[in-house]
Amino acid sequence: MSGGVDSSVTAWLLKQQGYDVLGLFMKNWEDDDDSEYCSTRQDWLDAASVADVVGIDIEAVNFAAEYKDRVFADFLREYSAGRTPNPDVLCNAEIKFKAFLDHAMAMGADLIATGHYARVREVAHPDGARYELLKAVDDTKDQSYFLHRLNQAQLSRTLFPLGEIPKTRVREIARDLGLPNAAKKDSTGICFIGERPFREFLNRYLPSQPGPIVTEQGQRVGTHHGLSFYTLGQRKGLGIGGVRGRQHADGTGPVWYVARKELATNTLVIVEGHEHPWLLSGSLAAGQASWVAGGAPLPGSYAGKTRYRQADAPCVLDRPGADSFALTFSEPQWAVTPGQSAVLYDGEVCLGGGIITGAP
């Protein structure tokens, strides 16, 4: 239980279904715990208040050490290498469905449940039950993208009660129950950063290495604060203003996007226009593959996502293996970013995915 409305309604639904429910509040971050950006104390108060209304016990458990070792260290390594990681994917695999799951089992629990919008389906198999990870019924809230690294053992012990319910109904239930957090805003951003300025946070852990910002023609137009602070497709925060001689006939200036990060020369390359060819990719290669079924799917036609807020894109899976694969898309994809996750779907079934490494 995070203190948010989703996990709160999840606890109530489980109790209504006859489960013996215990709430666990996870503390995953301790640095600057008393800062204006850290809401851990308020979240704990909200979770405890909800548990009182729902009528269940709640305990707090500290996974800050595990989080720093398993998630944050990887986060810093990826940014140092010029990539843009997705720590929420790793947090789910290593903390919520590993450290938390192990802790719950050690306490004698049979199952764990979270407020994620996804579904688990048990299917018959000659060798025993198999579990599929499915998209949520509410497609606008589906979070299977962030859960694609979950394996059979984890899914067999997990419930996602909100997978069948639209978010609007979750809010209604919370209001009808009089939950103290019924109107609480959904959390955004990376859990350990919160709403703080990203550059300010990263500067505390990684050295700043300013360098040139250049156009595709090589014209220097500014200075970046360090390649770690930028991601492909980024438009805001470049600090270059208008570039001389590039004003349009209507008096407006060009719109610039980050297209490349050249680590060897510490150079940030920008291009003009959302549809610039350097921002479009027809294929990708991925490593650190993780397949929900335990093995790679067969080569063929599927749908893929290279970022969370993206419609399924038709693609062909090529050279799938235990650790890597390649995807070729029917239409070029925008700002495919190394370090982010490429996730594969067969209809509503999430098959798994991997970390984008670049072109195949």
Image (cartoon, rainbow, N blue to C red):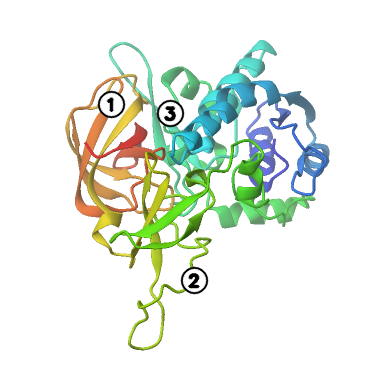
Residue that carries the numbered disc 2 in the rendered image: 241
Mark 2 or 3: in front is 2
Quadrant hosting residue 348: top left
Whole-Å distance between the Cαs marked 2 and 1?
Answer: 41 Å
Mark 2, secondary structure of its residue: loop
Residue at the (78%, 52%) spot, across then down: 178
Q: Secondary structure at mark 1?
A: loop
Depth check, mark 2 against mark 1: the one in front is 2
- Residue that mark 1 sits on: 324
Q: Mark 3: few, some, or many residues within 10 Å (few <14, many ≥20)?
A: many
Location of the N terminus by quadrant is: top right
Q: Is residue 354 left or right of residue 192?
A: left
Residue annotated with mark 3: 149
The residue drawn where x is 69% and y is 45% is 4
Q: CA distance from mark 2 to mark 3?
A: 41 Å
- Residue at 65% from the left image edge and 55% from the top image edge: 171
Q: Position of residue 121 (x, y in %)?
A: 41, 30
Q: Which one is in front in this view, the residue at disc 3 or the one at disc 1?
A: 1
- Dot 3 or dot 1, earlier in sequence: 3
User: Counting residues from the N terminus, which is met first, the one under dot 2 or under dot 1?
Assistant: 2
What's under tag 1, amino acid-wise? Answer: Ser
Work out whether residue 193 can be spotted. no
Identify the element where label 3 is drawn.
loop
Looking at the image, residue 317 sits to the left or right of residue 81; the answer is left
* Three-letter code for the amino acid on which mark 3 is drawn: Arg
Q: Residue 275: horizontal and vertical position, in percent?
A: 28, 64
Tell me the amino acid under the disc marked 2.
Gly
Q: Quadrant of the C terminus?
A: top left
